[in-house]
Image (cartoon, rainbow, N blue to C red):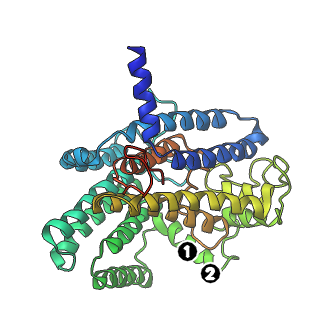
Amino acid sequence: MLKRIKESIIEVIQGADLILLGLCCTASLYGIAMIFSATRYNEDNRKVLVQTAALLIGIVVYFGISMIDLEMLIKRWKWIAAFDVLFILLLKTPFGVSDNTGNTAWLKFPFLPVSIGPAEVVKITFIILLAWQLQWLREEKRDLRSFSAAFYVGGHTLGIAGLYFVISGDMGNALMFLLIFVVMSFVAGFALRWFALLFGASGAVIGGIIAFDLVPDSKKYMLNRFIVLFDHSYDVQHTGWQQTRSLLTIGGGGFWGQGDLHGTQSQAGVGSVPARHTDLIFAVIGEELGFVGATLSILLLVAIIIRVLVVGWRAAQPFHTYVCVGIASMVMFQMIINIGMCLFIMPVIGLTLPFFSYGGSSVVTLFAAMGFVSGIKKRTVVRRRPGRPLGSNAVY
């Protein structure tokens, strides 16, 4: 019995994408080290313990998810779609809690030690459903040009993004749904005119709202976050405070940094660098480890993205390719926007740096997403190279 269990465990480990797992673990350990530094000023080790536990759970989830057959899972697409809607609607129950911006974007259950962000989970299931829709349109309907095809996938995307934004008020993750949709649809080969229409209509709507001053008072802080990008002196003590402090912190790092645990701003008291362990973790990296450390963190994330895209490129069917593209674009956009926030060239919209920022549920769901990629790699038939014995496991 024990021998069979041992053999099963070895089979699961050998079948998983260990290269991708290694990259994800390296980025996460790097992040834990920086979270320790970012929270050292108040002697709070709980966040480090939570993040470490999340990493260990994430590794187990990674191997577990890699065993799931996406073709079998997508047969329950109606249940997945219902889950997405109901999980978001839970934010309107007593379990829904607000963050310091007033957005109700978290679920706090009494039996869990950490909060859960529904968007982190729904983004993954959204990618799987959208990938299946795109394959169905391309392979079965052979239609990626008509209005009905665009409405089919666009309606799904706008429905989920709109529902989430209305319920939570979280603009960042609502935007992520739209960006993921654009990349996946473009890769699938959707007619370019629909992208032109999407961007044109979005620009017209946003421009009209601003021109006619239709932004509700409760949401004007969102508009101010865009205004401050073009005028850094605008509302420095409030809207621009977080990014001003971030830019100052990164600028103090120079090429080699001030040294781990020795950042002037990172190690200062409350108020020196807000959200230093979450949204602004990149600023801590830049100050303490300098340009070298910041570049290394970016290269780690780029390596993860490339690895996911390589698996997608070699996938056996378009469905798997689209899933990989969606997951890669999710990590890519979060990385670009978060680093842009820290450099004061992107608005603050609450997106954290994947694998690096503090967030137990975020780490676990990221490893779950990568587990799906690992499962795709496991089920991809790779052509046997000349000279390799039959039955050998191809590694790529």
Q: Report the residue marked by disc 2.
A: 230
As helix, strand or loop, the secondary structure at mark 2 comes to helix
362 over 127 or under it: above or below: above
Tell me the crowding category of disc 2: few under 14, some 14 to 19, or many 20 or more residues within 10 angstroms, Cα based.
few
Q: Is residue 221 left or right of residue 373?
A: right
Q: Nearer the viewer, residue 6 or 224?
A: 6
Alpha carbons under labels 1 and 2: distance apart? 7 Å
Contact (Cβ within 8 Å) of mark 1 with mark 2: yes
Disc 1 marks a residue whose amino acid type is Phe
Amino acid at pointer 2: Phe
Residue nearest the observer in this picture, 169 or 363 = 363
Q: Position of residue 274 (x, y in %)?
A: 68, 54
**Which residue is drawn at the image coordinates 38% and 20% (left, top)?**
4
Query: Which of the numbered marks, if any, corresponds to residue 226?
Result: 1
Q: Position of residue 211 (x, y in %)?
A: 43, 85
For the image, the number of numbered tags is 2
Q: Is residue 195 visible?
A: yes
Left or right: residue 275 versus residue 53 is: right
